[in-house]
Image (cartoon, rainbow, N blue to C red):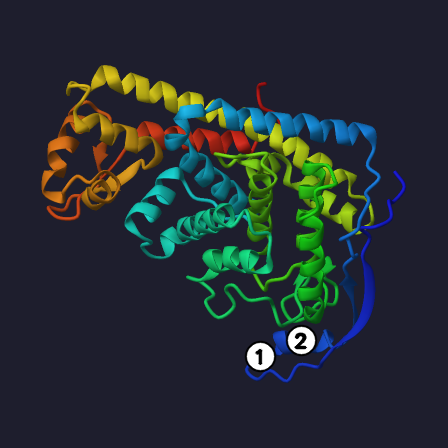
Amino acid sequence: MASLPGTAIGHERLTWPASTEAGYGLADLRAAQRQAGEYDAAIPAAIADLEADLPANVLANADEASREIARFDAELGQEIAPFASVLLRSESAASSHIENLTASARAIAEAEALGGGGDGRRNATLIVANTEAMKAAIALADELEEHAILAMHAALMHAIRPSTAGRWRTEQVWIGGGAFGPRGADFIAPHHERVQPAIADLLAYARRTDVPTLPQIAIAHAQFETVHPFTDGNGRTGRALVQAMLRNKRLTRQITVPVSAGLLSNTGAYFQALGSYRDGDPAPIVEQLSSAAILAVVNGRHLVGDLRKTRERWNEQITARRDSAVHRVADLLVRQPVFNALTLQRELGITTGNARRYVDPLVEAGVIVEFTDRTRNRAWRAPEILSALDAFAERAGRRTLAM
């Protein structure tokens, strides 16, 4: 397909200085010295007034995906409380997986409920931080402004890179290639002085109301990844922006549709589509987001169905009266599958001294198991819920899902 005008990047020739860094070994010093010289950095297209002439079939697929997103959001109705947080965490985990950050549902849930816990749980801790970024995106969805994007990034990166969290980058960045300079990289992002004007232009496009919604979101996302406004965390922040725009445009009103889980089914095509966008053709990234949304809805429905069945089965296993707070704890497990006494106090108002009164019947019913051997700070998990979340993640990595 011929390139479409409007999204193709330009280039400017810049100079990478000779390294004056002390402390390099000989091999690193030579690699750093080879980087000295001219390189071509991207100049992002101005898209505020973009009129993307997308093919009819691409627009039709985007419209179908938009309807599926809205339908799934409406389907949950009064059941939104237990499932909203589960779907948000699933989106966060899938978005992190795209960046090769993986952890089991159990590790993620334990990191969120009980705190980090060393290098072995580093990925889980980073995924929890991504969940916070997604929450910030949803909370700020009505404000497609610079401060909202900075807040998403701050939530994502504050624990691991506090010096740059929530700040536009002030240095050249690139994708691929070596660590000592941009020459030979797969993609060299715009010079840092171009970041803020490019973000202002992007947000002007994102706030428009005269373009089809899902194509608009896909193009805004691809433009964000092209600008690459942060030193780290651009992919996860850019996918959080997708969620903010889905909510801002009212395609979603109650839940987070785990679109990243759909993108995860073919990350090669996703990254290739971002490259096509930079070459001037936005159609592939629109197609990728549309396909990802359909897959996300299918997988999300499967997850919700698994969780419903599990919760219904528990009713047969639990011997406590239906009006007992034991069942309130069981409801909580759907969205909080790892917990301790402090969790029950915070979420349900059950004092820590009374926690065992409502926990023990669930242990006896086989709903939860204790995984600490301490007399204090005891914690429990719901294996069936964690298994359903792991199954969701496994399905997200497949190219196809049963429709």
Q: Is residue 258 above or below residue 60?
A: below
Q: Position of residue 43 (x, y in %)?
A: 78, 62
Q: Position of residue 115 (x, y in %)?
A: 31, 52
Q: Quadrant of the N terminus?
A: top right
Displayed quadrant of residue 317: top left
Question: Which comes before the other along the chain, label 2 or label 1?
Answer: 1
Left or right of 78 on screen, residue 332: left
Q: Position of residue 375 (x, y in %)?
A: 10, 46
Give me the disc on residue 32: 2
C-alpha separation, residue under disc 2 versus residue under disc 1:
9 Å
Amino acid carrying label 1: it is: Tyr
The residue at 61%/32% (across/down) is: 293
At label 2, counting other C-alpha atoms closer than 10 Å, the crowd grade (few under 14, some 14-19, many 20 or more) is: many
The residue at 33%/27% (across/down) is: 384
Could you tell me if the residues under marks 2 and 1 are in contact, i.e. CB atoms within 8 Å? yes
Q: How many marks?
A: 2
Amino acid carrying label 2: it is: Ala
Displayed quadrant of residue 211: top right
At label 1, counting other C-alpha atoms closer than 10 Å, the crowd grade (few under 14, some 14-19, many 20 or more) is: few
Residue that carries the numbered disc 1 in the rendered image: 24
SS category of the residue bearing label 1: loop
Q: Position of residue 111 (x, y in %)?
A: 34, 48
Left or right of 342 on screen, residue 274: right
Q: Is residue 252 above or below residue 135?
A: above
Q: Quadrant of the C terminus?
A: top right
Displayed quadrant of residue 343: top left
Residue 312 seen from this side = yes
Residue 299 seen from this side = no
SS category of the residue bearing label 2: helix
The residue at 64%/41% (across/down) is: 267
